[in-house]
Image (cartoon, helix red, strand yellow):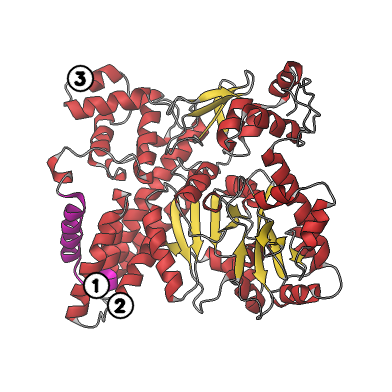
């Protein structure tokens, strides 16, 4: 083996690799003030960012799991590399030629690490496949398939789609001519051992290169083109030192910036769906790589979405309208509890996936599919209700028995009353009966634990997080916004926060006096709110007004729902109907105005 990397080169890599740029390939960072940046830690699961990066010092530290170090140690930990491999990865990133100390071992050294060789083999394989797609002969079948799916040559080029020749060792010969060994190609998952030696893993298939989030090609997805092929319809790279399907999302490398910018991700089911969505203008689409959407995928997306921010953020699942698609949607219902952002489902009524929808109805139809998404909770509940005849008393009771536990499982407690009212409407039952069923189901889910302890605000709830932020602002800097006077006690869904709003009244003069003479729970909450950092790191008038406006908007949304429910129970011919309807119109107008303020779109 060659010797170690010389100290001067290690120092150069450490000093010139901007740690915030490297970390940003894996974690969505935002300013934390004082020259620091922060994000969700990539090394442990958390809902509030405790992972801090100090670019001027070149260090990172997580206050949650106590992991820290420099840019080299970060790459070592995040990519599971040795020290030498991490330095080589950073050197490749900046096109820097490393120098090694001489070694007494005269045996030849493979250029770079095993990982580097695998990535290089994958890169060359992707280029080879891409070139083959444009060649004569059997590749025409692949081009015709893409054409039928609505993809022209430019689209195929954009996504690097290629073709694996219908030969035993076409790729092997090509890469061996470039210095790769059988062992390296097998390690990369590009070949496998046959009866007479190594053969190519992919033959006579369309090829999609799969990139990790940093952009490196780590594997491939391949679709068969011939019915004579007895293999699976889609065949992926087997697990390798760089290809871990449970931690990969196809399209994430090109979607990550837009996901971070818009705080939205659309999860589709296949490679062609990702292509169709992006070409249609839905540039936040990603797909799993031959496996179900799982915990590791959730962790990756949460880091990109900065999923501690209750004010915005959407995860939208698209599923086929068939039974398998509905089953996948119900699995997503369980996964929703691991997100803080809002989760939605977009299902095309005729069961078309984004690719088929684009072929039939064009790009606008794909965008409309995403725009017409429905909350995952609503979809899950209605999916259960479809199994019952709601025209009969027996069907309604059975539907309630099946659906009440779903409402009780909703993590955001402030949403439960809203879905309780909605469920009552869908069932055509009185709200008290439905509320009792949900309460009973909640007691069974918690094993009676909730009633045995004093309730505290659920900080996993987006609405509670918003209410908490509003109280922190008025307690820490009471003079920062004039909108506080418009905040009412009923705008807070949690009873403890509602009580604190009443205590504060029109403004805050002396926090110490406020804490005095309160019970232990209120005192503890007040102390927390007085010292807990604001999510943006600093309070200014624009941010404060955005938070207060968003809080009022959420409250008005609840009031609008209550009035709509009330109108459903009143005969339109009754005299009071128009008065209540006018109140609804006025509230809706005010809610829309507050929506713009809540997004920070203030006119100065």
- 442 falls in the magenta region: yes
Asked if residue 562 shows in the view, the reply is: no
- Circle 2 SS class: loop
Q: Nearer the viewer, residue 546 or 481?
A: 546
CB of mark 1 within 8 Å of CB of mark 2?
Answer: yes
**Along the polypeptide, which appears first: circle 2 or circle 3?**
2
- Circle 1 SS class: helix
**Along the polypeptide, which appears first: circle 1 or circle 2?**
2
In x, y percent, where is residue 27?
A: 57, 38
**Could you tell me which residue is drawn at 44 percent across and 31 percent down?**
481
Q: Please give the residue where the numbered disc 3 appears in the rendered image.
A: 516
Asked if residue 246 shows in the view, the reply is: yes
Quarter of the figure with the N terminus: top right
Q: Would you say 302 lies left or right of 411 here?
A: right
CB of mark 3 within 8 Å of CB of mark 1?
Answer: no
Q: Please give the residue where the numbered disc 2 appears in the rendered image.
A: 387
Task: Say which mark, if any, is on residue 348.
Answer: none
- Judged from this view, the residue extending furthest toward the front is 196
Magenta span of residues: 424-447
Q: Nearer the viewer, mark 3 or mark 1?
A: 1
Task: Say which mark, if any, is on residue 399.
Answer: 1
- 453 falls in the magenta region: no
Q: CA distance from mark 1 to mark 2?
A: 8 Å
Quarter of the figure with the C terminus: top right
Badge 1: how crowded within 10 Å, few (<14), some, or many (20+)? Answer: many
Q: Is residue 72 above or below residue 468?
A: above
**Could you tell me which residue is drawn at 23 percent across and 21 percent down?**
515
**Along the polypeptide, which appears first: circle 3 or circle 1?**
1
Q: Nearer the viewer, residue 249 or 284?
A: 249
In x, y percent, where is residue 472?
A: 37, 29
């Amino acid at each position: 083996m060659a010797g170690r990397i010389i100290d001067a080169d290690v120092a150069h890599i450490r000093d010139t690799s901007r740690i915030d740029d490297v970390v940003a390939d894996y974690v969505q960072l935002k300013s934390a003030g004082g020259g620091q940046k922060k994000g969700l830690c990539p090394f442990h699961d958390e809902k509030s960012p405790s992972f801090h990066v100090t670019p001027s010092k070149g260090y990172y530290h997580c206050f949650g799991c106590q992991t820290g170090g420099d840019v080299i140690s970060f790459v070592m930990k995040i990519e599971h590399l040795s020290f030498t491999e991490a330095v080589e990865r950073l050197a490749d990133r900046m096109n820097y030629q490393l120098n090694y100390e001489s070694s007494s071992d005269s045996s030849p050294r493979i250029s770079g690490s095993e990982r580097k060789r695998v990535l290089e083999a994958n890169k060359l394989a992707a280029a080879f496949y891409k070139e083959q797609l444009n060649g004569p002969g059997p590749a025409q079948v692949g081009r015709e398939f893409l054409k039928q799916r609505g993809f022209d040559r430019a689209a195929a080029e954009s996504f690097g789609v290629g073709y694996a020749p219908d030969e035993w060792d076409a790729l092997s010969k090509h890469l061996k001519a470039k210095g790769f060994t059988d062992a390296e190609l097998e390690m990369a998952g590009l070949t496998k051992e046959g009866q007479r030696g190594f053969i190519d893993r992919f033959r006579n298939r369309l090829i999609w290169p799969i990139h990790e989030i940093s952009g490196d090609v780590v594997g491939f997805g391949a679709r068969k083109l011939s019915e004579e092929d007895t293999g699976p319809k889609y065949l992926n790279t087997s697990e390798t030192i760089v290809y871990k399907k449970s931690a990969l999302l196809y399209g994430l490398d090109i979607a990550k910036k837009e996901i971070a910018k818009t705080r939205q991700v659309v999860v589709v089911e296949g490679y062609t769906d990702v292509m169709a969505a992006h070409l249609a203008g839905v540039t936040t689409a990603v797909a799993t790589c031959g496996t179900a959407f799982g915990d590791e995928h959730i962790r990756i997306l949460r880091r990109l979405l900065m999923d501690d921010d209750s004010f915005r953020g959407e995860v939208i699942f698209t599923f086929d309208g068939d039974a398998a698609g509905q089953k996948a949607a119900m699995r997503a219902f369980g996964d929703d509890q691991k997100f803080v952002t809002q989760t939605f489902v977009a299902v095309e009524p005729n069961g078309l996936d984004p690719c088929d929808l684009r072929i039939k109805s064009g790009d606008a139809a794909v965008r409309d599919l995403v725009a017409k998404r429905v909350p995952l909770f609503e979809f899950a509940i209605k999916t259960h209700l479809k199994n019952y005849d709601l025209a009969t008393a027996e069907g309604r009771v059975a539907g309630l028995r099946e659906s009440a536990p779903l409402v009780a499982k909703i993590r955001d407690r402030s949403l439960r009353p809203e879905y309780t009212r909605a469920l009552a409407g869908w069932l055509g039952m009185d709200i008290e009966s439905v509320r009792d069923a949900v309460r009973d189901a909640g007691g069974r889910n918690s094993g009676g634990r909730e009633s045995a302890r004093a309730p505290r605000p659920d900080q996993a709830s987006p609405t509670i997080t918003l209410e908490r932020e509003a109280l922190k602002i008025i307690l820490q800097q009471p003079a920062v916004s004039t909108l506080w006077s418009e905040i009412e006690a009923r705008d807070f869904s949690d009873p403890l926060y509602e009580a604190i709003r009443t205590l504060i009244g029109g403004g805050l003069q002396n926090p110490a006096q406020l804490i005095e003479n309160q019970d232990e729970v209120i005192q503890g909450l007040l102390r927390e709110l007085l010292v807990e950092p604001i999510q943006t790191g600093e309070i200014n008038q624009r941010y404060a007004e955005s938070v207060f406006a968003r809080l009022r908007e959420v409250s008005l949304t609840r009031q609008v729902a209550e009035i709509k429910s009330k109108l459903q129970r009143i005969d339109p011919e009754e005299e009071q109907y128009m008065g209540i309807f006018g109140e609804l119109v006025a509230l809706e107008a005010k809610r829309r105005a507050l929506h713009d303020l809540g997004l920070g779109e203030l006119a100065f």
